[in-house]
Amino acid sequence: MPPFKLYLAGPEVFLPNAVAYAKWQLELCKQYGFIGLHPMDNNIDLGDKDMSTALRIYHGDIGQIRQCDIIVANCNSFRGALIDDGTAYELGYGNALGKISYGYIDKLIPWKERILSRYVCVRTDSGMFADKEGYLLVDDFSTSINLMMQCGMLARGGRLIEGGFEDCLLAISSDLALRMPVQQP
């Protein structure tokens, strides 16, 4: 069976050392017997900062998601309390295509606890919490990230892993070994 192809989603493309980080991730994929497909493969020569460049990046990333067998996503908070919106899109797109998806996060704590620890929320008259814009904190289903993201992983045969990127690769390897023989999508 050929090696599984993993699409590596996450905000690491915004790091100052994004190319070096991508190389590290791709090397780890190889060490675990996977082929990594990284968005940096489509983003190294950005060209002009215009819509045609944005569309080229988008189509390149979507093409990699279509080619992959498994999505691997960094689900840590990015510029706020939630996962990167591009990463969320890639997870949803992969889920719609029937791809297995895995995520990793530093700490598997309930989403509500994560929000309350980072933002000032007030208790409403009904006893619920609301943020400063008045939106209720209602996503309290014991998930560590938005329920659509985490349940999407579970529905497709993946899961959210506590730890880092390598911990996620180890979990995928272990899960695949337990399910063998696995039919690739």
Image (tube, rainbow, N blue to C red):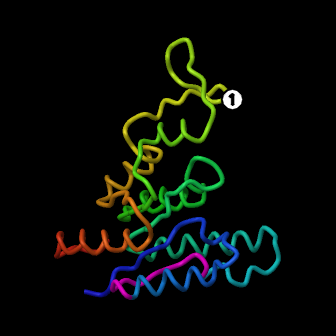
Image vertical order of residue 185 relative to residue 1, above or below: above
Picture residue at 43% right of the left edge, 57% below the top: 96
Magenta highlight range: 31-40
Q: Which of 166/100 is in front?
A: 166
Residue placed furthest toward the front: 117
Q: Nearer the viewer, residue 36 or 164?
A: 164
The kind of residue on which mark 1 rests is Glu
Quadrant of the image containing the C terminus? bottom left
Looking at the image, residue 73 lies above or below residue 23: above
State whether residue 76 is above or below residue 115.
below
Q: Residue at x 39, y 43 (%)?
A: 143
Q: Judge from the rendering whether residue 150 lies leftward or rightward of residue 89; answer left or right.
A: left
Which x, y percent locates residue 115?
54, 39
Residue that mark 1 sits on: 133
Whether residue 143 appears in magenta in the rendering, the answer is no
The verdict on residue 38 being magenta is yes
Residue 140 occupies quadrant: top left
Q: Is residue 51 above or below residue 23?
A: above
The image shows residue 150 at horizontal and vertical percentages of 40, 50
The kind of secondary structure element at disc 1 is loop
- Residue drawn at point x = 52 percent, y = 68 percent: 9
